[in-house]
Amino acid sequence: MVKKTLIPIGPYHPLQEEPELFKLYCEGEIVKDIKWETGYNHRGIEKLSEKKTYDQSFFLVERICGICSTSHPFAFANAVEEIGNIEITNRAKYIRSIIGELERVHSHLLWVGLAGHFLGYNTVFMWAWKYREPVLDLFEMISGNRNSYAMFKVGGVRRDIENNKIPQILKVLDLVKKKTDMLVGAVMDDPVIHARTKGVGILTKQDIIDYAAVGPTARASGVDIDVRRDDPYAAYPLVNWKVITAEKGDVFAKAEVRLLEMYESISIIEQCIEGLKKEKEGDINVKVKEIPEGWGTGHAEAPRGEVFHYVLSDGSNSPARHKIRAPSYTNIATFKKSCIGQTISDATISLAAVDPCYCCTERMAVAYDSKTGDRILNGNELIALSAKKTQNIKNQF
Amino acid sequence: MGFKEFCFKKSLWLFHFAGASCNNCDIEILDCLTPRYDVERFGMVLVGSVRHADVLLVNGSINQRDKSRLLEIYEQAPKPLVVVAIGACGCTGGIFAEGDTFAGPVDKIIPVDAYIPGCPPKPEAILAGIVKLLNK
């Protein structure tokens, strides 16, 4: 009989920047089962949001995740604007889309780099991250910060992209396009990368549907979904672009989808800039007096997939309930399909292939027993119970 | 030259502990290694285990689950050790300080030698902070 070995990855492991615990149950080289544990990154954002006003909440949802720090405000803005029936100006729409797509470019470059790093191909890592810097410089020029741009607000955007900044943006896009060509060449034509990623971590179309995976993970398996097209928002209906899909569902297909998506993003930004030139400068806000009672939902296509926000308003100046679902939450569950049966060395790249973002994922959950309906207590409640008992005993003496 | 100066005279090895963060500081720390900033030219490397490290970089707010682990990692580290709290969350808890799982900023849990504020601090700021600390 083959002995089963447990290999823990994390919670503080050099492979991951974020705290997360994976347990790989292996027989020999082959991964037989995988479990993961979260909670190292829980910050109680949904509850915090209820304490903040709508304007302050934007800064909070931006800090759910640092890499996709536009997609959460994007979805939140969509949700709040749905409650208030607010129609923003065209210029604000273009600016929102430009920021969203620039973010996709830098996020995909980051992923390509990390994927190269996980494969032991550090040259790709250094290249990709080097050419990500000019995009971050653009963000600094537009918003004043390299990450966490604070561009969004209810009824528009906080800062304008003035026409004199446009040449610089186009210049950087040109550079990024050239460098993307180089990276596509480095990835798509390299026999070593082919050997490491083709046929590894395959997710079939049915797996994607079963696990409700979203974003590039789904598109790489031939599931043609993209919120930007299916439920258009901001300037996406005003420009021409296409959704990139691939059929194979392996790691290579996921890399292919992400790399080709970068070209689409660059093309969207260029078209948005054309649109921006036609609109009047400074016309970026509509006045919002109050948010009426009601509820609204907002989607946005983050670099990792669909971000979903639900906001319930009671007519006051802060959300009464705010529910967030981030793409990694469903994408991480696909590990059950993609990692089992792989060797340990392929498991890491299969884990990395969905571009998991744990800080998006952390949600508080209370479990109920499905048969009896009993509430299964969480850690804090157990501690509270224990403290109560000690108190009771103390009182007796 | 005192013992501490002697220990930090040559290449510093860094260990990165990510608390309950938003990932921004983690990425900026990683960014320091990439060609534009390239801290490796000063002999600084990120190492996989705190047992090999001279500097412990802590970022993110610390929640109840992280707290005991941060303490454990601090105890495992060889001394003398320099602890650097990175970002607004590492320094004070930042926007998450009001959260119900928040277990106190880093300096309430372990002694901190330097604070690098910013949300997130730029890679230049992280480098400047560490250089300032070493010249102290």
Image (cartoon, coloured by chain):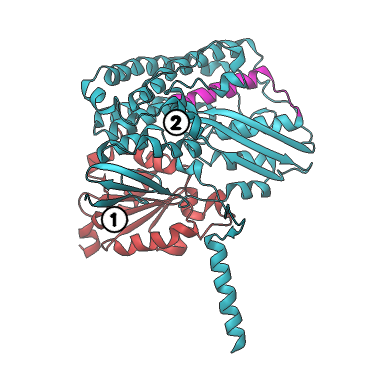
Q: Is residue A227 left or right of residue A171?
A: right
Q: Position of residue A115 (x, y in %)?
A: 32, 31
Up/down of B24 relative to A111, above or below? below
Q: Amino acid at mark 2?
A: Asp
| SS of the residue under disc 2 | helix
Quadrant of the rendered image containing residue A188: top left
Q: How packed is label 1: few (under 14 Cα within 10 Å), some, or many (20 or more)? A: many
Q: How much space separates mark 1 and mark 2, taking CA atoms? A: 39 Å
Q: Position of residue A288 (x, y in %)?
A: 76, 31
**Quick one: which chain is cyan?**
A
Asked if the residue under mark 2 is in contact with the one under mark 1, i.e. CB atoms within 8 Å, the reply is no
Q: Mark 1 — on which chain does it sit?
A: B
Q: Nearer the viewer, residue B2 or A178?
A: A178
Q: Which residue is mark 1?
A: B50
Tell me the magenta residue range.
A85-105
- Number of labels in the image equals 2
Q: Position of residue A20 (x, y in %)?
A: 40, 48
Magenta span: predominant SS is helix
Q: Mark 2 — on which chain does it sit?
A: A
Q: Which residue is mark 2?
A: A207
Quadrant of the rendered image containing residue A307: top right
Residue at 37% from the left image edge and 34% from the top image edge:
A338
Q: Which quarter of the image is occupied by the C terminus of chain A?
A: bottom right
Q: Nearer the viewer, residue A54 or A217?
A: A217
Quadrant of the rendered image containing residue A311: top right
Up/down of B111 relative to A370, above or below? below
| SS of the residue under disc 1 | helix
Q: Position of residue A153 (x, y in %)?
A: 65, 32
Residue at 36% from the left image edge and 37% from the top image edge:
A351
Q: Amino acid at mark 1?
A: Val
Tell me the shade of chain B: red
> Do marks 1 and 2 share a subunit?
no
